[in-house]
Amino acid sequence: MSDKDMHITEHPDGGWQGKKPGAKRASFRTDTQAEAIGRAAEQGRREGLEVSIHGKNGKIRDKRSYGNDPYPPKG
C-alpha cells in the first residue's frame, strides 16, 4: 500500500470513512457509503488515488483508480 491509496470503510462510531493506510485519523467521515465514495472520487481525481471500497463485511467489493492504475488497459 502506498500514500496513493485510500480505503472506504465503516467508521467505528457509525457512518463511513475515507482513510489512507497508516493514517491515525480518517480523511473524511460521512453518513452513507455513497457519500463516502463521492468524496473519495473528488479527492482521487485531485491526488491520483487508487480507492478500495469495502462492504459491511470488511472485504473489498470494488476498486476505482483515479490516475494511479497499477494495471492500465493496453491500447
Image (cartoon, helix red, strand yellow):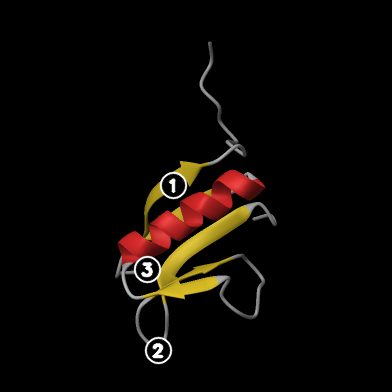
Asked if residue 50 lies left or right of residue 35, the reply is right
For image coordinates 33% across by 65% down, the residue present is 33
Query: What's the CA distance linking mark 2 and mark 3?
Result: 15 Å
Picture coordinates of residue 12, whole percent (x, y): 42, 85
Mark nearer the N terminus (1 vs 3): 3
For image coordinates 40% across by 89% down, the residue present is 13
- The kind of secondary structure element at disc 2 is loop
Please report contact status of discs 1 and 2: CB closer than 8 Å, yes or no.
no
Is 2 placed above or below 32 here?
above
* Residue nearest the observer in this picture, 71 or 28: 28
For image coordinates 62% across by 66% down, the residue present is 21
Total of numbered circles in the picture? 3
Q: Quadrant of residue 34?
A: bottom left
Disc nearest the viewer among 2 and 3? 2
- The kind of secondary structure element at disc 3 is loop
In the picture as drawn, the residue positioned furthest to the bottom comes out as 13
- The residue labelled by disc 3 is 58
**Amino acid of disc 3:** Gly
- The residue labelled by disc 1 is 63
Mark nearer the N terminus (2 vs 3): 2
**Amino acid of disc 1:** Lys
Picture coordinates of residue 54, whole percent (x, y): 38, 61
The quarter of the picture where the N terminus appears is bottom right
- The residue labelled by disc 2 is 13
Classify 10 Å Cα crowding around label 1: few (below 14), some (14-19), many (20 and above): some
**Amino acid of disc 2:** Asp
Mark nearer the N terminus (1 vs 2): 2
Query: What's the CA distance linking mark 1 and mark 2?
Result: 24 Å
In the picture as drawn, the residue positioned furthest to the right comes out as 3
* Residue nearest the observer in this picture, 63 or 42: 42
* Residue nearest the observer in this picture, 19 or 40: 40
Q: Quadrant of residue 19?
A: bottom right
